[in-house]
Amino acid sequence: MADRVREPYAAPGQQREAAMMGMYIFLASETMLFSGLFLVALHLRLEHAPEVVAASRQMHYFIGAANTALLLTSSLLVALAVEAAREGRARPAVLATAILLGLGFLALKAVEYRMEYAEGILPLPGAVTEFSSPARHAFMNLYLIATALHAVHLSIGLGLLATLAVRLLRGTLPLPERSIVMVNAGLYWHLVDVIWIFLYPVFYLAR
Amino acid sequence: MTLQERPDRENLADTGLSETPAERVSYLRAGHTLKSWLLTTDHKRIAILYLISITFFFFVGGAAAALVRLDLLTPAGDLLSNEGYNRAFTLHGVIMVWFFLIPSIPNTFGNFLLPLMIGARDLAFPRLNLLSWYIFMLAGLLTLAVLILGGVDTGWTFYTPLSSMFAHGQVVLAATAVFVAGFSSILTGLNFIVTVHKLRCPGMTWGRLPLFVWSIYATSLILVLATPVLSITLALIAAERLFGLGVFDPAVGGDPLLYQHLFWFYSHPAVYIMVLPALGVVSELVAAAARKPIFGYAFVAGSSMAIAVLGFFVWGHHMFVSGQSMYASAVFSFLSIAVAIPSGVKVYNWTATLYKGHISLDPPFLFAMAFIGLFVVGGLTGLILAMLAVDVHVHDTYFVVAHFHYIMVGGAVSAFFGALHFWWPKMFGRRYSLVWGRLSALLIFLGFNLTFFPQFLLGYLGMPRRYHVYPPEFQVLHVLSSAGAGILGLAYLMPFAYLFYALRYGPPAGDNPWGVTGLEWQTRSPPPKHNFDAVPVVDGPPYDYHVEMEGDEDG
Ligand code: HEM
Ligand SMILES: [Cu+2]
């Protein structure tokens, strides 16, 4: 059934284009979601420049850099898997490596949170924290919210990729006919990546 | 696993459908079980599901309004406690905005008509459409939970630091409800945009789209781009209340004003979510009533887009007295006044369309007339409010309350009823009593004005909004307003009587009871499950009515 042209459509090409357009609109919506957070960050930075600079000096920017590298590499792998799918070749191993890199990101992030927690700058509920200025506290609040929201998106992306990897392994995803599913999951993954590319300088390099 | 082209393009008789005889008769006959409704992916059935749900919320919100108006009958706050009054108007606002007005026209008539009007068999993503209804219902249940667990008292605007630090009540639950409803909005908007782009039938070019489709398209852009900003803003409030992660909290260097900026960045465009579909409906009703092509089609379509775009840049007019920069206020004031241009274009073009038309005074047209009158009053008072110097005096008074009710209730709700009366025969295949229809249009118009006109005067005289104890000299106007609300409430109930009666006893409507153009009128009433027996082909402009010229035989 899944490979047939479904109800409102007349042709497979039309159905594919619609699916892709739907994904792009969804991503535009996601971008607006995060843009609210970036606006808050900008506001903080403009209102309390010295405190924000001091706060971002405290961040473990090398962990952030490593994470950036992980995500970029995994995006590359996903792009390769998608290209292969378009040509009708299933590449579950490539996809699985991308997933591992994504898990690596989450693991590194957890390590980083732990370090910040130990330093008393991660405002988790109930944590003992110590900030040299109020704005620093707001900055870390925003950091925690933004990175946590990003991690949630990343986990959803991992779920998507994992489902696809399983389907590729089992051969239940007809390629190249249904490669659009791969394309859309890939687009989502790239967006998660792009959001990080903006989060990283805003929180780690804003000095 | 072959891919097949469906239907065969060369063979026009091949509809590419596998349908049962019952589905061929009408979408209403295609299954009578509860399951056939709750698991349907038919846009027409989903529209009916929405119609039932939002009607329910309309009455819940209306009950809260009744409490507010009853309490305001006397200068003392004797019916409700202070807390209770705050909860009543908050619940009224939250329900009416997010659970009635925002989904009202798009999710019912947009859902039902969009595919029919552009000659498609369904929306682009039928299952997503159903999902969006379930998300909406989940959000609705959360709101009802808020109501049962004691309510919220922050006002529909959830201003910080009240909402984040001081309010008791179910702020987080209410914010969650609105947050969840937002996903429903986003998915619906996404579905509409893709449908308009990808599923227009042969010959249905952008320049031939019905104006209702244009307005739904413009609305969808706002739904998709503005709603997520509200979502993140509400999430930030929840983070502050639940986990102490304040970013609006001045104690940690946050800024409560930033909340207002984010909130109005969504909520001003959101007022256009509520009114643009209404403008689209009225364009349809006016053309149908005048039996003439819409005057200046391109301008009316373009003004919808202009309103949608400009609407993103005027939010600061809600913050003139908040302490934002004076220069920002001046710019926002100027931009807000600019919004009046596309709005004016519409009103002038409707008037020009009616000029020398063969106007029939049927209920849909009466509702359209009511809309135009009330929209003009609401829009002009919007201009008054947009003048920086004036707004400093009337901000947060009943003048503002009257302004937005003229547009949101007088305008959008009248258009909703107009749409209901115009497309009811198409949706259910039955005619209703025109006499009762005219009567209810008239009563709604009169009741509305009696309710809200006194509020302009009250606001001008200095009655602040959101207070239930007031100086005795305001009582006369408040009593008038409450009396009007009583009439309005009854008038809103009337259509239910004769429309339901028509469902059973009304005479069959025929395909095109109003004798108008538009693809939705070329299929049966009620339409078959797949909308059209054969995919239609469009070969002429929209609203292609015959116009008599000087020297015509019968002119
Ligand atoms: C067309 C549909 C419109 C709708 C649905 C609408 C709705 C609203 C709502 C809900 C509010 C009050 C918000 C609150 O404080 O709770 C409001 C306030 C306001 N509106 Fe409108 N409005 C519309 C059009 C306009 C236009 C065209 C203008 C100006 C050209 C305008 C100018 C204003 C101003 C300046 C305020 C703020 C007044 C104050 O709080 O002091 N509105 N409107
Ligand atoms: Cu506004």
Image (spheres, helix red, strand yellow):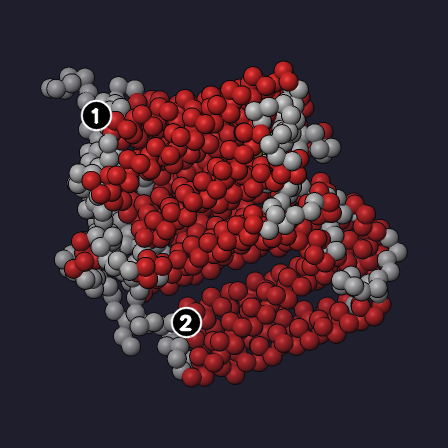
Label 1 crowd (10 A; few <14 / some 14-19 / many >=20): few
User: Outermost residue toward the right?
Assistant: A132
Q: CA gap, disc 2 to disc 1?
A: 52 Å
Label 2 crowd (10 A; few <14 / some 14-19 / many >=20): many
Kindly identify which numbered label has been placed on residue A179: 2
Q: Nearer the viewer, residue A80 or B500?
A: B500
In the rendered structure, which amino acid carries the disc numbered 1?
Answer: Val
Which residue is at 58% across, 36% downward?
A: B89
Residue A29, horizontal then vertical, whole percent: 53, 53
Residue B334 in sight in this render? no
Residue B156, horizontal then vertical, whole percent: 59, 40
Residue A92, horizontal then vertical, whole percent: 49, 81
The mark tally for this picture is 2
Residue A176, horizontal then vertical, whole percent: 38, 74
Quarter of the image where ligand 2 sits? top right
Chain that bears disc 1: B
Snapshot quadrant of residue B372: top left
Kindly identify which numbered label has been placed on residue B547: 1
Snapshot quadrant of residue B18: bottom left
Asked if residue B327 lies left or right of residue B505, the reply is right
Q: Nearer the viewer, residue B272 or B444?
A: B444
Kindly identify which numbered label has been placed on residue B188: none
Asked if residue A77 lies left or right of residue B161, the reply is left
Chain that bears disc 2: A
Which residue is at 70% across, 29% downward?
A: B321
Q: Nearer the viewer, residue B159 or B16?
A: B159
- Give the quarter of the figure containing the C terminus of chain B: top left
Q: Secondary structure at mark 1?
A: loop
Q: Are marks 2 and 1 in contact (CB under 8 Å)?
A: no
